[in-house]
């Protein structure tokens, strides 16, 4: 089995999702909805979203391995897969050391968790792993359909595609503010990035690997960092990592404290109605090379400066 996520989707915290909203997301032409946060292992919300729709895929972003035993997740997976075959992608991950005292040897713990899912019959192509650094990214490619990174830059997506080659799933979350005034967009985007994310060691380490300095990460984040993590512009120009008109990413969402903005049914973002949104791209080999490794979304369209 493989789950078709489409080219667009919606990432939203579990507290902001409902069956009615899922039905609306489907009507608007999205291919998937990602259940954000750390949904409980019974996956009751996920099942209710699938029950309310006919073709929309639903993915978890992500089930935290420290909070839910693999046996419980596997039982829920099989229940949902039997009821809605081919429409559910199980996203799992280790979360953050600041969130749990059980956080020890995260790589080994995730390997053991995936081993148990194998034993319980959860198929490789039916799951995705949250990953940021090289070892976790490789594990996601080898032991799942691919990766669902959070709070990453377009450069991270490009380098991950180069690492993966074609075929494997790369579905990064990316926040979007639909405002072509940079100062106003940053005023909206910065709070959603600063707390708690710029205080979490996993995200800070990943951003430093990408070339950002400590000074970029402190005091709410530099303008350049916020621009790299929160795309902004008019609907036709707000694709993460680009200043040119293009089709946005396959998974789109909104911060917990905001209203989501939805694209139209067309394969463009010209129908977005709200100012705040957040997008995750399911990249399946459609990556353009960039001549630089320096984060530069406000200057680089992925092809040339």
Image: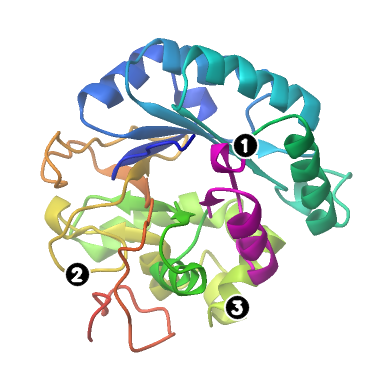
- Which numbered mark, 1 or 2, is in the foreground of this view? 1
Q: Which mark is residue 245?
A: none
- Is residue 80 positioned above or below 69 on the image? above
- Is residue 182 positioned above or below 66 on the image? below
- Asked whether 146 falls inside the magenta stretch, the response is yes
113 displayed left or right of 26: right
Label 1: element kind: loop
On the image, the x and y values in percent for residue 243 come to 19, 69
Q: Which mark is residue 243?
A: 2
Q: Closer to the N terminus: mark 1 or mark 2?
A: 1
Q: Nearer the viewer, residue 5 or 157?
A: 5
The residue that mark 3 highlights is 209
On the image, the x and y values in percent for residue 89 come to 52, 34
Kindly tell me whether residue 124 is visible in this rendering: yes
Q: Closer to the N terminus: mark 3 or mark 2?
A: 3
Label 2: element kind: loop
Label 3: element kind: helix
Q: Closer to the N terminus: mark 1 or mark 3?
A: 1
Q: Nearer the viewer, residue 187 or 297?
A: 297
Q: How is the image coloured?
A: rainbow
* The C terminus lies in quadrant: bottom left
- Asked if the residue at tag 2 contacts the one at tag 3, i.e. Cβ–Cβ closer than 8 Å, the answer is no
**Callout 3 environment at 10 Å: few (<14), some (14 to 19), or many (20+)?**
few
Q: Which mark is residue 123?
A: 1
The answer to which quarter of the image holds residue 133 is bottom right
Q: Which residues are magenta?
A: 123-149
90 displayed left or right of 66: left
Residue that appears at 30% across and 63% down: 286
Residue that appears at 37% across and 58% down: 230
On the image, the x and y values in percent for residue 172 come to 45, 54
- Is residue 104 positioned above or below 72 on the image? below
């Amino acid at each position: 089995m493989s789950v078709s996520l489409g080219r667009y989707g919606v990432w939203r915290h579990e507290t902001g999702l409902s069956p009615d909203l899922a039905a609306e997301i489907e009507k608007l032409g999205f291919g998937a909805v990602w259940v954000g946060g750390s949904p409980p292992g019974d996956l009751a919300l996920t099942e209710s979203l699938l029950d309310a729709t006919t073709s929309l895929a639903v993915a978890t972003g992500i089930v935290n391995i420290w909070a839910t035993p693999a046996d419980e997740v596997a039982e829920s997976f099989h229940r949902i897969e039997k009821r809605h075959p081919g429409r559910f992608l199980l996203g799992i991950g280790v979360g953050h050391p600041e969130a749990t005292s059980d956080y020890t040897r995260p790589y080994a713990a995730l390997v053991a968790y995936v081993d148990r899912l194998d034993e319980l019959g959860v198929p490789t192509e039916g799951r995705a792993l949250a990953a940021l650094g090289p070892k976790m990214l490789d594990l996601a490619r080898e032991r799942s359909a691919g990766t669902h990174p959070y709070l990453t830059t377009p450069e991270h997506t490009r380098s991950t595609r180069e690492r993966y080659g074609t075929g494997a799933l790369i579905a990064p979350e990316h926040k979007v503010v639909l405002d072509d005034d940079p100062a106003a967009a940053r005023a909206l985007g910065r709070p959603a990035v600063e707390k708690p994310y710029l205080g979490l060691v996993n995200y800070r380490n990943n951003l430093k690997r990408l070339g950002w300095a400590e000074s970029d990460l402190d005091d709410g984040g530099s303008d350049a960092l916020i621009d790299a993590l929160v795309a902004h512009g008019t609907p036709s120009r707000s694709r993460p990592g680009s200043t040119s008109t293009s089709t946005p990413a396959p998974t789109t969402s909104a911060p917990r404290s905001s209203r989501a903005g939805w694209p139209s049914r067309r394969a463009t973002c010209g129908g977005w109605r709200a100012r705040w949104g957040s997008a995750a791209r399911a990249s399946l080999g459609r990556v353009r090379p960039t001549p630089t490794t320096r984060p530069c979304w406000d200057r680089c369209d992925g092809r040339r400066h």
